[in-house]
Each structure stands twice: as structure tokens, then as C-alpha cells.
Amino acid sequence: MLWVELVLNALWAAIPAVGFAMIFNVPRAALPFCAAGGALTYGLRDVLMHAHLSIELSTFIAATTIGIIGVFWSHRYVMPRPVYTVASIIPMIPGTYAYEMMISLVRMNTEGVTDVLLSRFIENGLHAVSILFAIAFGLVLPSMYYTKRKQPII
């Protein structure tokens, strides 16, 4: 039953990836790759989290994976790498942590600062920032590697 849930979550993650790809005017031929990338990154992160890795490390590994695949796709289909990678990482954006952080901030403003609210604010904020850094570094590392090897990246 767990695998069915993981596969369904991955398939649902393909929808926002394609939606954001359409917002970014990605060519129609690249949309299936964006859907596959979004499903792959979210699914891989979900599997790694079920293997008891932290969400930050799981996100980093998934972003690095789509970064490597994006370099391959960009060479094969002669299209810029961000066409595939940016839309693929959208399902991993830490919206829940950022939302909870802002709710804690608003509650501190209206109810006053308490230890619990401050703790929630810091914890959720650090999670959100850590996940965003994991996404950024995961996408940058493959392109830095190929640039160092003097292979052109489109």
C-alpha cells in the first residue's frame, strides 16, 4: 500500500511541474520531460524520506538527480538546462514550512511573543531556508561539474 501512495504522490507532483512549465513558456515538446522530472524529483524525495533521511538531504539528492538528468536532456535535445530543471523542482518548494513560519510570525505580532511561537517560527524558517538551499545547490552542482570538465552546457 505504501508504494501505491508513493507513486500516486509522484504522479500528482507532475501536475504543478507542467503548470509552472507552461507559465514559463516552455516549448510544448519539453512538457512531458517537465512532468517526468517533477514526478521523479518528488517521488525520489518521498522514497528517501521513507528511508529515514531528513527532508533537507532527500531534497538535495533529488535536486542533484534532476540536475544531472537535466544536463543529459539539454545535450540530447539541444535546449537550455533550466527548461527541464526549474519546472521539475517546483513540487519540492517548502510551502508548508514557509506558511507555518509566517503564521507563527503573525501570531507573535497579535498575541505577543512566547517561547512556543518563537520556537515554531525559528524551526519552520530554518527548515524552509535549508530546503531552498538544498534545491539550489543540488541544481548547481551538476552544471559546475560539467563546466569544470570543459564540456559545453547549453
Image (cartoon, rainbow, N blue to C red):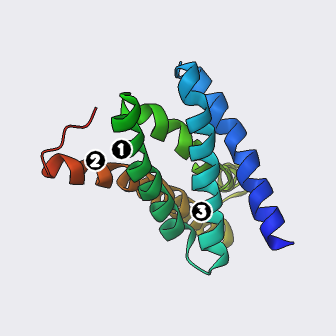
| Residue 40 in picture, x, y percent from top left | 60, 53
Q: Is residue 154 left or right of residue 96?
A: left
The amino acid pointed to by label 2 is Ser
Question: 31 or 105, which lies in front?
Answer: 31
Label 2 to label 1, Cα distance in Å? 7 Å
Quadrant of the rendered image containing residue 151? top left
Are the residues flagged by discs 1 and 3 in contact, CB closer than 8 Å? Answer: no
Is tag 1's residue or tag 3's residue first in the polypeptide sequence? 3
Q: Residues within 10 Å of mark 2 (few under 14, many from 20)?
A: many
> Between marks 1 and 3, how big is the CA–CA gap?
18 Å
The outermost residue toward the right is 1
Q: Residue 93 in the image: x percent, y percent? A: 58, 48
Residue under pointer 1: 71
Q: Nearer the viewer's eye, disc 1 or disc 3?
A: 1
- Residue at (28%, 31%) from the top-left corner? 154
Give above or below for 126 relative to 116.
Answer: above
Name the disc covering residue 44, or none: 3
- Tags 2 and 1 touching, CB below 8 Å: yes
Q: Position of residue 5 (x, y in %)?
A: 82, 63
First in residue order: circle 2 vs circle 1: 1
- Whichever of labels 3 and 2 marks the residue nearer the N terminus, that label is 3
Secondary structure under tag 1 reads helix
Q: Amino acid at mark 1?
A: Val
Q: Residue at x 68, y 37 (%)?
A: 16
Give 96 or 50, whichever is nearer the viewer.
Answer: 50
Instruction: Report which quarter residue 45 is drawn in.
Output: bottom right
User: Which residue is located at x 70 percent, y 51 percent?
Assistant: 103
Q: Which residue is mark 2?
A: 143
